[in-house]
Image: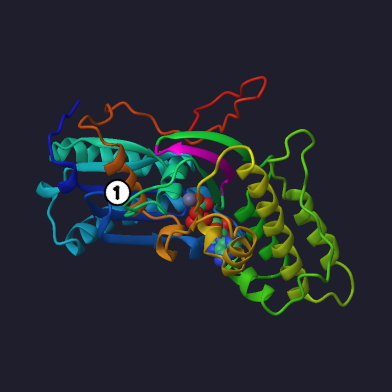
Amino acid sequence: MRVLHVKRSLLIVLGIESTCDETGVAVVQDGQHILSNVIASSADIHEKYGGVFPELACRRHFEVILPLIEEAIQQAGTSPGQIDLIAVAKGPGLVGALLIGMSVAKGLSIAWNKPFLGINHIEAHLYAGMMGLPQIPFPALGVVLSGGHTLLLKILEVGHYEPLGTTVDDAIGEAFDKVAVLLGLPYPGGPPVEQMAKRGDPKKHSFSAGKIKQRPLDFSFSGLKTKVLYTLREEGVNHADVAASFQETAFKDVIHKARLATQTFPCQAIFFGGGVCNNQRLQKMFAEAFLDLPLFWPPFHLCLDNAAMIAGLGAKKFLGVGDPLDLEVQPRVVYQRKDATPPRRGENL
Ligand code: KG4
Ligand code: ZN
């Protein structure tokens, strides 16, 4: 176990992200100054499959991770000797992809004699909107909307969360990616669906998102996606209208459930994270619906998967002692509501 005594304000953290199809490496100083943040995406390989092909994602991580580390260190104008901590995304994500980032982090930890820390990817998405804020208003609502997750969380402080709602089937970003395939649009589907939706009428089709009996804060998008499939089979249907109606329905559902969630505690602010949060229509709809609360959206480059958020949260959570070298990756993280019975098996956030 490596113990380190460095003033937090001087801490230089190397972050590594490899949970899905993006390999990210970043160098962050004192938890907020991003000295470098480099990303290589394998989205081009997955395009023809309409979703992530795990084995191919792993091969790309393997090819690019070491050159990216060199590039990030060089761009930051630093050297391995100056790195104080290695922070790595430990999960959730694709097991093979996680193992590559984790193994490299452990290897560097041994080679450079520096501590390393495993970081929860979802928590890092939420932290992306908090990085650099002088004061964070708590308790707050966390809204994570990504390709793998749709989550509402009560944030009591950094590191202390209470899951309020999650999806029972597709994640919202996954629904965008699948609807994009149905519309003949490329992967990842969120950005082209957003563009197409701009030309369509959001009221043309009366779609609805799933409601879960007795769990009003949970989500379900698979029925909505199927409705899109059937609508597209109708003759003469305008694709832009379908894209706009789908997007509007999905976002109205998120806003409705976020509103319900803020009513369950004295909420001071809303923090957003995950790739879907880059959607301009979503940001506008939230701004109109929540005039009463400050909304914190991460900047564009920190919404999508990246290693700066991993390094930033690593700096925040590091207390001088790194994780042991036998730390395992956590591909599956279960978000356990307080009232959930029976408790589900798995790692909690
Ligand atoms: O957070 P992220 O980079 O990766 C995960 O952790 O999943 O999110 C990627 C997801 C993809 O499903 C992508 O289609 C979606 O975010 N996305 C968007 C937009 N940009 C990315 N969805 C809707 N509108 C966007 N502008
Ligand atoms: Zn992510």
- At x 84%, y 63%, the residue is 206
- Quadrant housing residue 226: bottom right
Residue 37, position as x, y percentages in the image: 30, 60
Question: Seen in the image, is 4 located left or right of residue 154?
Answer: left
Q: Which residue is mark 1?
A: 15
Question: Seen in the image, is 138 located left or right of residue 141?
Answer: left
Query: Furthest residue to the left?
Result: 81
Residue stretch in magenta:
148-158
- At x 35%, y 55%, the residue is 24
Residue closer to the observer: 111 or 221: 221
Amino acid at dot 1: Gly
Residue 115, position as x, y percentages in the image: 20, 35
Residue 171, position as x, y percentages in the image: 63, 48
- At x 65%, y 25%, the residue is 340
Residue 52 visible in the current orientation: yes
Residue 11, position as x, y percentages in the image: 18, 46
Residue closer to the observer: 194 or 232: 194
Question: Seen in the image, is 313 located left or right of residue 115?
Answer: right
